Amino acid sequence: MTDLHRLSIRELSEGLAGSKFSSRELTEHYLKRIEKIDTQVQSYVTVTPEQALAQADAADALRKSGMANVLTGVPVAHKDIFCTQGIKTTAGSKILDNFISPYDATVVAKGKVAGLVTLGKVNMDEFAMGSTSESSYFGATKNPWALDHVPGGSSGGSAAAVAADLAPFATGTDTGGSIRQPASFCGLTGLKPTYGRVSRFGMIAYASSLDQGGPMARSAEDCAYLMNVMAGHDNRDSTSVNVDADDYVANLNGTSVKGLRIGIPKQYFNVAGLDADVKARVEESLKKLEDMGATLVEIDLNMTDAYVPTYYLIAPAEASSNLQRFDGVRYGYRCENPVDLTDLYKRSRSEGFGPEVQRRILIGTYALSAGYYDAYYVKAQKVRRLIQQDFLKAFESVDVIAAPSAPTTAYKIGASLDPVEMYLGDIYTIAVNLAGLPAINAPVGFDKDQLPVGLQLIGNYWSESQLLSVVHQYQQATDWHTKRAAIAEETV
């Protein structure tokens, strides 16, 4: 079958269950697509055909024995920030280019239990620091909609792989928008869960109080299937919250759009730099939801100006602490012929880390240093609480909050964005991580250059089912999530 990559997760599950095709046939189909098409997209860092086919054969045996799960035999791509036993795990960095993980991240282990077939590891901004996937040591991933444009970041490899139909769905992580923004740039659905909903064990840390794993796929329904695998409490992760996870697939029609109160922050739609096409598409999608029975309610989020400075103090400070472990001694890259221990540390880190990672380590170390800790880091944490309270006050009068996922569509690879401009591009996403809230991106159209535009819906704590349900119903009434880039239409 030449069109297996066009099937939804539900259709793949039903096809496997009905013996319309085997997991081996499905896996071979995707591996052939990766071999032919990924030379243009460069979404994968490591492809694992031997392991994938072995897992597919095991899945087929389970199907025959009647022991299969709903997702047994369905392929998946993992962001290269999740540790995978016996497979290289790089976090997009030279400093981990030779690191073979001795264990699986909880997300990966749960995928194996569910019977998912791992196609490989996909590219990302180095240590998840960036919004373009250009900071990867392994080179820039291309946006399938326009190969001279970025796919977003840091989960750009995950987004590009799904958008090019090189995987039916993929895992991603979101520290300040790294699921939602690339999903927006690549025309996908991407869910950032409530902080603590998905285990961080085995997920290489950038900023521990902000990082959260989540699913990326074409539709809310596809995301719900992967979310059923990823969500749940984990004793090995001290930040995992012991709150029962929902059956996200069963709850896809659990929230009616009729009567839904959607908060429209007036500050969000008056941000300098908000592209006119992005604003128009988002407003059109909100009008569609209103036609479906939702009520649009104008709200105030008064802490908007504090989002970027607060995030870019807290995140680099935590990165500075987390990345101390990469010292050239225990594992990872080590410089050649160090003259002493200080030289070993200095050269291993300066040669192993890229410019963006070094920049954030320096900012974070400065913010945590004696004399500045109280003035910067502690104050940022206090402002973070005010941002959280700002959202909680808004949720007293609305059910979800709407915003663009990004102020622009995807920009060209190599565009002369200075770091500050790039940081300002996170204006709509970073507050969600600071507050620990869930949020989802849904594709809602295209700009004048036929690049995808995304709508972001932000929910209150533990409302992932509600967000998936609202987007699912929107997607039943629209077809934006079914649109495919030309490269995804290529057959093998």
Image: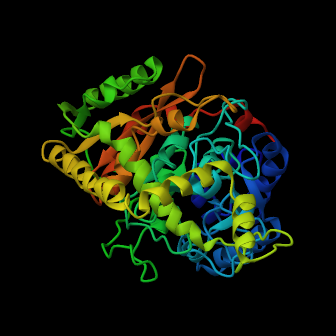
Note whether residue 22 is visible.
no
The answer to which image quadrant residue 294 occupies is top left
Q: Is residue 158 left or right of residue 444?
A: right
Provide residue 29's location: percent of width, then percent of height.
78, 54
Provide residue 212's location: percent of width, then percent of height.
45, 61
Note whether residue 246 is visible.
yes
Please name whichever residue, 88 or 389, is drawn nearer the observer in this view of the structure: 389
Q: Is residue 186 left or right of residue 38?
A: left
In the picture shown, does residue 84 fall above or below 480? below
Please name whichever residue, 165 or 336, is drawn nearer the observer in this view of the structure: 336
Provide residue 416's location: percent of width, then percent of height.
64, 28
Provide residue 53's location: percent of width, then percent of height.
78, 69
Quadrant of image for the C terminus: top right
In the picture shown, does residue 352 fall above or below 441? below
Please name whichever residue, 127 or 51, is drawn nearer the observer in this view of the structure: 127
The answer to which image quadrant residue 31 occupies is bottom right
Residue drawn at x 47%, y 57% as measured from the top left: 366
In the picture shown, does residue 282 fall above or below 59? above
Q: Is residue 357 left or right of residue 219?
A: right
Colour option used? rainbow
Number of numbered discs overlaid on the protein picture: 0
